[in-house]
Image (tube, rainbow, N blue to C red):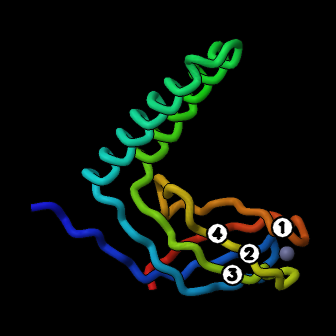
Amino acid sequence: MPRPMADRAVIVTLTASGDEASAAAGTLIEIPRATRIVRAAGFGFGSILVAALFIPIPIIHLLAPPAIIISGMVLATRQFRATARLLPLHVSCPKCGAMITLGGGIGVRHPDDPLEVRCGDCRRGLTRTIAVA
Ligand SMILES: [Zn+2]
């Protein structure tokens, strides 16, 4: 029986270089292996189909199909390795208070590892950590 998709309530913390930190509640969704395989295959085959559309176009057909297939394979690999996905949430910058959007996208490989992010407002480097709520 396939394991159901587990949603975990988490606390997402942004830490600045000093001891300032800010946190917000978030949701981490584990992506089951079967889903990752299907999505990765979708990116792979999808890129081949899109690349085929460019074959009849002169000159562009030399550049676009290989570029599209390579990007498709890169996305497929990233998708396959992403074991969890953080739902988009907003956390205020611990230094300047600007709202920073975290999460979304295709997911992350090691959600428990700290991730370096940058505040779009004050450009300071911040560390994102996810802890089980
Ligand atoms: Zn800031």
The answer to whether residue 106 is above or below residue 72 is below
For the point 49% across and 24% down, the residue is: 52
Q: Position of residue 29 (x, y in %)?
A: 40, 70
Distance between the alpha carbons at the discs numbered 2 and 3? 5 Å
Distance between the alpha carbons at the discs numbered 3 and 4? 10 Å
Labels 3, 4: front one: 3
Distance between the alpha carbons at the discs numbered 2 and 4? 11 Å
Distance between the alpha carbons at the discs numbered 1 and 4? 14 Å
Q: Nearer the viewer, residue 15 or 109?
A: 109
Q: Which mark is residue 91?
A: 3
According to the picture, the residue beneath numbered tag 4 turns out to be 128
Residue type beneath disc 2:
Ile
Distance between the alpha carbons at the discs numbered 1 and 3? 12 Å
Is 111 positioned to the left or the right of 31 in the image? right
According to the picture, the residue beneath numbered tag 2 turns out to be 100
The answer to whether residue 59 is above or below residue 38 is above
Whether ligand 1 has any atom under 8 Å from the Cβ at mark 1 is answered as yes
Is 58 positioned to the left or the right of 53 in the image? right
Marks 1 & 2, CB-CB < 8 Å contact: yes
Q: Secondary structure at mark 3?
A: strand
Residue type beneath disc 1:
Gly
Label 4 crowding class (10 Å Cα cut-off): few <14, some 14-19, many 20+? many
